[in-house]
Amino acid sequence: MLKANVVFATMTGNNEEVANIVCEALTNKGVEVNETEISQTDVEDFKQADILVVCAYTYDEGAMPEEGMDFYDDLKETDLTGKVFGVAGSGDKFYGEYFNKTVDHFDEAFEKAGATRGAEKVKIDLEPYEEDIEQLTAFAESLVNMVNKKS
């Protein structure tokens, strides 16, 4: 059975909702899912899973969540070769060029760790609506398909 770790950082609850949608979609695909808040998660836990997902917000003008900085730094230094990853996040388009920059940062950190991108990044404006739920469900399916293609 495939295993996934889904980690989120949230201030408003939107990114926890994004993570919940991804978890539900993965579970519906027969994946065993572990969902945790970023400050309560050790990057080493990612080594036990096939699929790795981060759902995090961007603060102010492109800043990463303070509670996720240690996780982010550890992620860049961890060897996750053979793992499949995806990054999603909710942000506010009000911030223009800084909209959901944290999604880009985590995407780059996973690449640096040697993981394989299993789905395109998903950036949602504020809370997830119907079309966002469909996009996140497709995101989860893409992650599962990538793992299955690799094995």
Image (cartoon, rainbow, N blue to C red):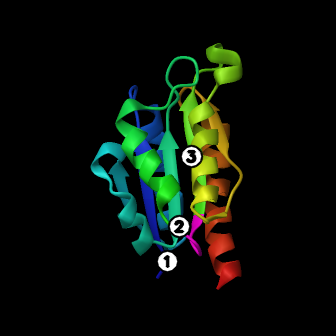
Question: Which class describes the residues within 10 Å of circle 3: few (<14), some (14-19), or many (20+)?
Answer: many
Amino acid carrying label 1: it is: Leu
Residue 8 % position (x, y): 42, 44
Residue plotted at (38% across, 27% down)? 11
Please give left or right for residue 21 compared with residue 111 in the image: left
Determine which of the numbered discs, if any, sits on residue 2 in the image. Answer: 1
Provide the residue designation for mark 3: 106
Q: Closest to the observer: 23 or 130?
A: 23
Pointers 2 and 3 in contact (CB under 8 A)?
no
The numbered mark, 2 or 3, whose residue comes first in the sequence reads: 2
SS at circle 3:
helix
Q: Residue furthest bottom?
A: 151
Q: Main secondary structure of the magenta part?
A: loop
Residue 81 % position (x, y): 58, 72
- In space, the residues marked 2 and 1 are separated at their CA atoms by 8 Å
Q: Is residue 132 above or below residue 150?
A: above
Q: Quadrant of residue 97?
A: top right
Question: Which class describes the residues within 10 Å of circle 2: few (<14), some (14-19), or many (20+)?
Answer: many
Residue plotted at (52% across, 54% down)? 76
